[in-house]
Amino acid sequence: MSYPAALADKQRKAYPELAPLDLPMTADTAFALVRKSARRMLRWKIVAEDMVARRLEAAAVTRLFQFKDDIVIEVRGNGAKSTIHMRSKSRIGKGDLGVNARRIRAFLRLLRAGR
């Protein structure tokens, strides 16, 4: 899931609303919410969960061409607060027509609604 720093700058400019999500709950509670929400996402297959690191990995299959995209979600805690960091990246191709950004938005909406 690595990518060049120049690409990160382009993504920040193209999608300024996509940022880590702060939640008013402990990291353990937030990770439980992440796990529950990930299971509700259509076409996601959870491939790894690390309860200690509070990290979830999944693969999503795109609807039209059945491409697989990789998803990584990490929960970082700070006392009674936590921050959700999420990435979604296509395995192949140079562009995704905004699919990964839409996926991140949908997941973060689900997290906010699940509080």
Image (cartoon, rainbow, N blue to C red):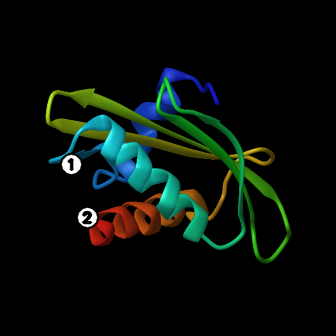
Within the image, what quadrant is residue 111 found in?
bottom left
Q: Are marks 2 and 1 in contact (CB under 8 Å)?
A: yes
Label 1: how many residues lie within 10 Å, few (<14), some (14-19) or many (20+)? some
Number of residues whose C-alpha sits closer than 10 Å to that of mark 2, classed few (under 14), some (14–19) or many (20 or more): few
Which quadrant is home to the C terminus? Answer: bottom left
Residue 11 tag number: none
Residue 78 horizontal/vertical position (percent): 19, 26
Give the residue number, with chain letter if any, for mark 1.
23
Residue in the image at 55% along x and 63% along y: 98
Q: Secondary structure at mark 1?
A: strand
The residue that label 2 is drawn on is 115
x and y percent of residue 62 in the render?
A: 75, 68
Residue at the image position 21 percent from the left and 48 percent from the top: 23
Work out which residue is located at the far bottom of the displayed protein and give it. 64
Of residue 23 and residue 98, the one placed in the foreground of this image is 23
Please state which amino acid type lies under the numbered disc 2: Arg
Image coords of residue 76 (percent x, y) = 33, 30
In the rendered image, the quadrant that contains the N terminus is: top right
Q: Quadrant of residue 9?
A: top left
> Which residue is most to the right?
66
Question: Marks 2 and 1, how far apart in space?
Answer: 9 Å
Q: Is residue 98 left or right of residue 70?
A: left
Asked whether 69 or 92 is in front, the reply is 69
Viewer-closest of 28 and 34: 28
Q: Residue at 32%, 68% (x, y): give it.
A: 114
Residue 90: give x, y in percent of width and height: 70, 48
Q: Secondary structure at mark 2?
A: loop
Residue 68 falls in image quadrant: bottom right
Say which label, 2 or 1, has the lower sequence index. 1
The amino acid type, in three-letter code, at marker 1 is Leu
Image depth: mark 2 or mark 1 in front: 2
